[in-house]
Amino acid sequence: MLKLEATTEQRREKTELVLANIYTLPPIPKAMTGAMKLLDNSAVCISTITNIISKDQGLVTKILTIANSPIYGLQRKVTSIDFAVMVLGFTELKNIISVLSMADAFKSKTDSLNQKDFWLHSYITGSGAKRLSEEIGLGNSGEIFVAGLLHDLGINIIQRYFKPEFRAINEMVKSNEIGYLEAEEQVLGLTHQEMGQFLINKWNLPESLGETIAFHHQPSTLKDNVELASIVHLADFMTQRLEVGCFQWDDDIKLDKNIIDILKFRNESNLNRFMDSHAELFKSQLLSVTF
């Protein structure tokens, strides 16, 4: 068991020092980087993008899986990358490839974290948040999709760069009967939410993305981007309530009931009916995943 002799502030400073020195990540496949550069150019033809993506069969499979998922509700099956590009659009496709790139970069073999469960939960939360935001009429569904996919980024950071602390957190949760957020605070001086935001800011990604990650457990305490954080929180909570793509690290997640007013559900009964009515959608999302 890791000894916690330093103060919370000292542990926080030590954690931030490690985070600040994460300069490089494992290389991202060339097909991904090439496609992302092309997608920045709105004048590029679809065939050029298709040729780049098609060089990576794993990337092809993942993109087609997402294009055929229930969140898009297409009547026709997407069987080719060129059609997927047409269906998703450049912005959406770039969002998807960006997240898939980060998922590949952070993959590691460990007995402590089930990577398949982790990314499955991330995908279900992201795709669910996108669909819910469209139904509620929030807009920015592409940004919400990315925020949902990366909401637990900090957990992967902990298991990759803080292995002794990762084990200590799990042991503390099991033996002390406390939640993961409290255990993270005690061991690292930071929660996985704060660690995710730290890296999002360090990599100069959108501030709204960092704030959503930092407040996805308590969205109502956020001043700006509160609706974005609230919809991700709702989708995250629904994975547990509906037992679809649920994740051990989130098994103690509590609903921030202030989202009832933020997302204009008016009362808790309406929210509960809304969540339960999406059980089949979340289950179908799970069944559509092939990676």
Image (spheres, rainbow, N blue to C red):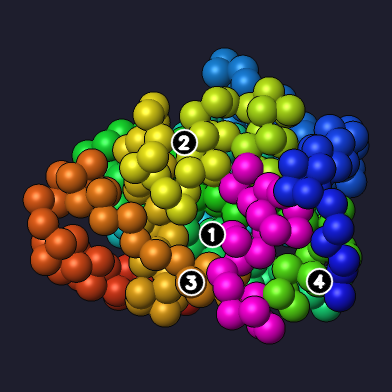
How far is mark 1 from mark 2, CA to CA? 14 Å
Residue 143, numbered circle: 2
The magenta-colored residue range is 173-194
Residue 123, numbered circle: 1
Q: Is residue 176 within the magenta segment?
A: yes
Q: Amino acid at mark 1?
A: Tyr
Write down the residue under mark 4: 167
How far is mark 4 from mark 2, CA to CA? 32 Å
Q: Amino acid at mark 4?
A: Arg
Of labels 4 and 2, earlier in sequence is 2
Q: Amino acid at mark 3?
A: Asp
Circle 3 crowding by C-alpha within 10 Å: few under 14, some 14–19, many from 20: some
Q: Residue at x 26, y 49 (%)?
A: 258
Question: What is the x, y in percent for residue 27?
Answer: 89, 43
Q: Residue at x 63, y 43 (%)?
A: 194
Question: What is the x, y in percent for residue 269?
Answer: 11, 66
Residue 251 placement, left or right of 56: left
Of labels 1 and 2, earlier in sequence is 1
Of labels 2 and 3, earlier in sequence is 2
Q: Secondary structure at mark 1?
A: helix
Of labels 4 and 3, earlier in sequence is 4
Q: Name the mark nearer the viewer: 4 or 1.
A: 4
Q: Secondary structure at mark 2?
A: helix
How far is mark 3 from mark 1, CA to CA? 19 Å
Location of residue 44 with respect to 114 vertically, above or below: above
